[in-house]
């Protein structure tokens, strides 16, 4: 039985990934400071267990007391993104993770297995260098990857950096340049993830948004074998936050958006495309969350998309956990 700590647990992507990996084990504690994400986690997974946050005021003995043999972690990514100004370890949001890294060499019962997920960009950061130095210092071998769900035949881009403890030190695979090159020929279509009973009004895109920003949307159809990464800004911002769905399969959206001057007068043309947002349930399915995953009723649509956008692809991480535990 594996004894697991789930750091930066969000809505429980790592927890679901461990379940999906079919290994025996228990999540002993999950740590996150976000109350919305914690409410989703509690709603689905952890009805009565303690929730704590990663903070430096918790002593090493606290973490040692779990005697956990596995740490699953997806620390905040903002320090390693352009939006977060690439501040790396000097970004305050990196501090709790640096504390955990530092703790590894001081623990009486350090974990045997470690898996960490982050954005592309982490590999060039000083935090990654600190992490790798400490892993070597503690005699862990490790392996670094870039993986996108497209490689597993899932029609969604989400290129992410992963580092996990392994038997050998293996450097970053040379696959970080383009995830389009990696798409799997057997990728399943978007239609496999769609709900039948969608309230179209709720997920419709306002005409004024279509008129002003229509050309910027990434549009996919049920027959498509790809979609863009869904981010926490989905439904709120237009560009690069995730794809929208075109149910009018026979029409060419590029032609419609490029040929016409879109205005209130000819909005009919666009309405024939039958565009809508993916529902939060559809996004969750594309990201590998199981059918029984749901949200507390009181959460707004914006909150639901936000926590999903911060999460991970469950199926990708499940495969990595299987690999992590191979030996
Ligand atoms: C990339 S998200 C993790 C997503 C998670 N794996 C999931 O499936 O939803 C990073 C998370 O770190 C949390 N976080 C940031 N600083 C933290 C801290 N000091 N202690 C605990 N959690 C923190 C954020 O609230 C956020 O949910």
Image: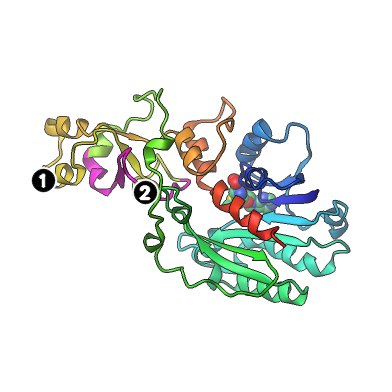
Report the magenta residues as a range.
Answer: 211-232
Main SS class of the magenta portion in the image: loop
**Left or right relative to 293: residue 301:** left
Name the residue tied to disc 2.
226
**Left or right relative to 223: residue 186:** right
Distance between the Cα atoms at labels 1 and 2?
Answer: 25 Å
Q: Is residue 160 magenta?
A: no
Mark 1 residue element: helix
Residue 323 visible? The answer is yes
x then y, percent, for residue 318: 61, 50
Which is nearer the N-term, disc 1 or disc 2?
Answer: 2
Residue 312 visible? The answer is no
Compared with 111, 256 (above or below) is above
x then y, percent, for residue 307: 54, 42
x then y, percent, for residue 82: 45, 63
The crowd level at tag 1 (other Cα within 10 Å; few <14, some 14-19, many 20+) is few
Name the residue tied to disc 1.
259
Which-is-in-front pick, marks 1 and 2? 2
Q: Of 162 and 58, which appears nearest the observer?
A: 162
Q: Residue sitting at 21 percent across and 30 percent down?
A: 271
Compared with 35, 155 (above or below) is below
Q: Residue sitting at 38 percent across and 23 percent down?
A: 199
Q: Which mark is residue 213?
A: none
The crowd level at tag 2 (other Cα within 10 Å; few <14, some 14-19, many 20+) is many
Mark 2 residue element: loop
């Amino acid at each position: 039985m594996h004894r697991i700590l789930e750091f930066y647990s969000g809505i429980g992507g790592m927890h679901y990934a461990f379940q999906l990996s079919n290994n025996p084990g228990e999540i002993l504690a999950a740590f996150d400071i976000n109350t919305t994400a914690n409410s989703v986690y509690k709603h689905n997974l952890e009805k009565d267990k303690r929730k704590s946050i990663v903070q430096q005021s918790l002593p090493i003995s606290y973490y040692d007391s779990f005697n956990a043999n596995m740490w699953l972690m997806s620390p905040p990514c903002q320090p390693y993104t352009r939006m977060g100004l690439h501040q790396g370890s000097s970004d305050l949001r990196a501090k709790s993770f640096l504390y955990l890294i530092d703790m590894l060499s001081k623990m009486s019962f350090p974990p045997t297995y470690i898996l960490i997920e982050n954005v592309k960009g982490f590999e060039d950061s000083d935090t990654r260098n600190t992490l790798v130095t400490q892993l070597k210092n503690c005699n862990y071998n490790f392996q670094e990857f870039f993986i996108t769900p497209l490689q597993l035949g899932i029609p969604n881009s989400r290129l992410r950096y992963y580092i996990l403890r392994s038997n050998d030190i293996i450097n970053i695979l040379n696959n970080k340049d383009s995830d389009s090159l990696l798409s799997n020929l057997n990728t399943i279509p978007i239609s496999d993830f769609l709900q039948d009973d969608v309230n179209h009004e709720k997920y419709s895109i306002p005409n004024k948004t279509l008129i002003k920003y229509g050309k910027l949307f990434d549009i996919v159809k049920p027959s498509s074998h790809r979609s863009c990464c869904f981010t926490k800004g989905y439904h709120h911002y237009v560009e690069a936050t995730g794809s929208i769905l075109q149910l009018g399969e026979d029409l060419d959206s590029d032609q419609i958006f490029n040929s016409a001057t879109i205005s209130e007068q000819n909005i009919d043309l666009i309405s024939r495309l039958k565009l809508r947002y993916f529902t939060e349930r559809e996004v969750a399915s594309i990201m590998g969350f199981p059918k029984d995953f749901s949200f507390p009723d009181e959460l707004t649509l914006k909150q639901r998309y936000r926590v999903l956008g911060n999460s991970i692809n469950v199926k990708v991480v499940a495969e990595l956990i299987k690999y992590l535990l191979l030996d």
